[in-house]
Structures are given as structure tokens and as C-alpha cells.
Image: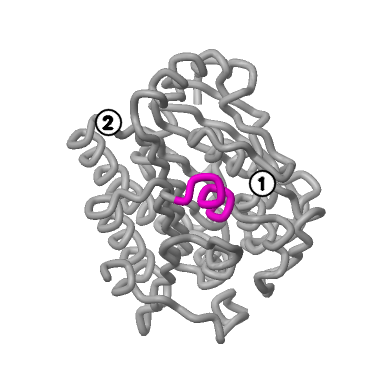
Amino acid sequence: MDRRQLLATTVAVTGAALLSPVAAVLPSGVARAAARRPKVVLIGIDGLLHTRIEPSTAPNLTRLGADGLFARGSLGAHISISGPSWATVLTGVWDSAHGITGNSFDARPFAAHPTVFTRLRRARPELKTHSIATWDMIAVMAGSGDPRAGVVVTTAPFPGDGDESRTDARTAADVVTAVTRYAPDFLFTHLDQVDHAGHFAGGARSPAYVAAITRVDELVGRIVAAVDARAAAEPDEAWTILVTTDHGHRPEGGHGGRTPDETATFVIARGPDFPAGALAEDITLADLTPTVLDLFAVQAEPAVDGRSFLRRSAARPAESR
């Protein structure tokens, strides 16, 4: 069953609502943060197996990874399903803590384990936080807690959009609008079509899966271009772009098990605190929320499972990818 069908009653806020580890660089990063306002865009690409990212088919993701930090990771014993994994990305705790085991859940887990949106706005109420997503369950996460994300948008599905490409394109367009017009301090976006291809178009080894990666890569390029244009126009802002996925896919398609292809994850980080060409192997999905908080000089309290990768031992330079 398509994940969108699992919670048909979720309220979808349309795009119209939008309009009404690297200790070696930490000292210089801290100096920059003191002089410039941090801004963070976290791009979530559902179901993207990182071994399928190639320069010829995903040039923007390849360039982002080369211009900053690229980290391969694994879910380990964590469930390789979207709901648990995106909850971990946005809370910094594993499924054993937040208790989400599938794609149908409500806001209750986020009372004990607040999202990064809630943590940021509790510490710094003036921060602007946006969530713009293709999958409707992201709105359950971003819309939970007190305070919740300042803007929560779920892209309305296009009729007949069998591969989700047009829906994802609208999501990305709303992200570009948000960055260009409103420059939120923290923005999370979710793009879904790669996972859709993994489920319904032949799996991770299929041409359709690669084609979906290429289309999403183009959308990432548009978002990066908007961020770079804003950064050039506003030199007092220090923009960081993070990219990650929630799980991989089996070659024949599907996920939820513990095979290396299903549990494979990755993190890309490009910004003032991340040297070009850095590689790491010890960064996990639980580390993203602590890292975002660290970029805003907010403590990760109450305790989280992850650890900011700004405070890891120096990543080794890239020898080859």
C-alpha cells in the first residue's frame, strides 16, 4: 500500500499557506557563527540507496558531497521504514526510544521526544522554522509539540502523478520560494519519488529508480541554487545544506529488513563548518538533530541518542569516491 494512503485523514496544508563531524574546523566555524546568522536547509530524499549516486546521473548531489562532507552510514538494528527513520532524523533518538515502528502514528511520541523544530523554538523563539514535504506524515512530526514548526506544508498530490515527479517538483518549488522570499532559519523538506520507484518500478537496480534519482537531483540543484543566491545577496547569513535519506532499497525493490542495501544511509553536509572532500563512516541519522542544534548554539536537551558531527574527530580527506 502507498504510504500516502495510510493516513488519509492527515490535514494537507497546500503551498498557498506558504505564501500568506569535523572538530578540526570547529574553531573557525564558531568564529563564523558569531559573526553571521546560521541558516540550515535539510533535504530528505526518501529511499535513496547511496551506491546509486553517480556523477553522470546525480551531478548536483555528487558536487555537494565533494564540496563538503560525505558520510556513509547504516541504520544497524533500527527499522528500515520511513516513519521510524524520519522520526529519528527529526528528533535525534532511535526507534527504541521514540517507539514508532511503522508509517502510521500520531503526535504522542513527540511529547517525550521533541522534534528539532520544537527544540529550536523553545530555545530561540525568534527562529523561523519551515517543513515542506511530499509525504503527509512529515506534517504529523513537524506539527507536533509546543511550539511546533512555524510553517508546515504538505504538497497536494497531482492527479495522475504516477511517479510522484510533479508532486516533488511542486515541493521543491515551494522550498525555493521559502528560501528566496522568507529565508527561514531552519527548513526541512522531503522528496518521495525515489522511494516510490523502488517500490513500484523495479527496485534499486531498475532504470526507473535511476531516472527518479536524476529527477530528484535536478530538484536538489534548484534548491542549492536558491540557497547560493540568497547567501551571495546576504553575506551576513551562513547557510548550511544537509542531505540525507531514511533507508535504502533491495535491488529488486522494497525495504524493512536488515540487509545492507535496506539499512544503508548517507549524510551530505556543505557549509562553513565542513571542509571540502571530507569523508566519514561514523555519522548516523540520529546525529542530524544534534548537529542542527549545534549550528544554532542550542543544547540538545533533553538527552538525545545522536551526537553533533561538528564535534567528532577530524574526518579524513577524500582519496576516492
In percent of width and height, residue 51 lies at 55, 41
Q: Is residue 74 above or below residue 130?
A: above
Q: Residues within 10 Å of mark 2 (few under 14, many from 20)?
A: some
**Left-right relation of 70 to 181:** right
Task: Please tell me whether mark 2 sits on a helix, a strand or a loop.
Answer: loop
As measured in the structure, the alpha-carbon distance from the residue carrying label 2 to the one carrying label 1 is: 29 Å
Q: Amino acid at mark 2?
A: Asp
Query: What residue sits right under mark 1 in the picture?
Result: 92
Q: Amino acid at mark 1?
A: Gly
Q: Is residue 72 above or below residue 47?
A: above
The magenta stretch is 117-125
Where is the N terminus found, in terms of image quarters?
bottom right
Q: Can see residue 79?
A: yes
Query: What residue sits right under mark 2 in the picture?
Result: 236
What colour scheme has been applied to the protein in the rendered image?
A: one colour
> Which of the numbered marks, if any, corresponds to residue 243?
none
In percent of width and height, residue 243 lies at 48, 43
User: Magenta span has 121?
Assistant: yes
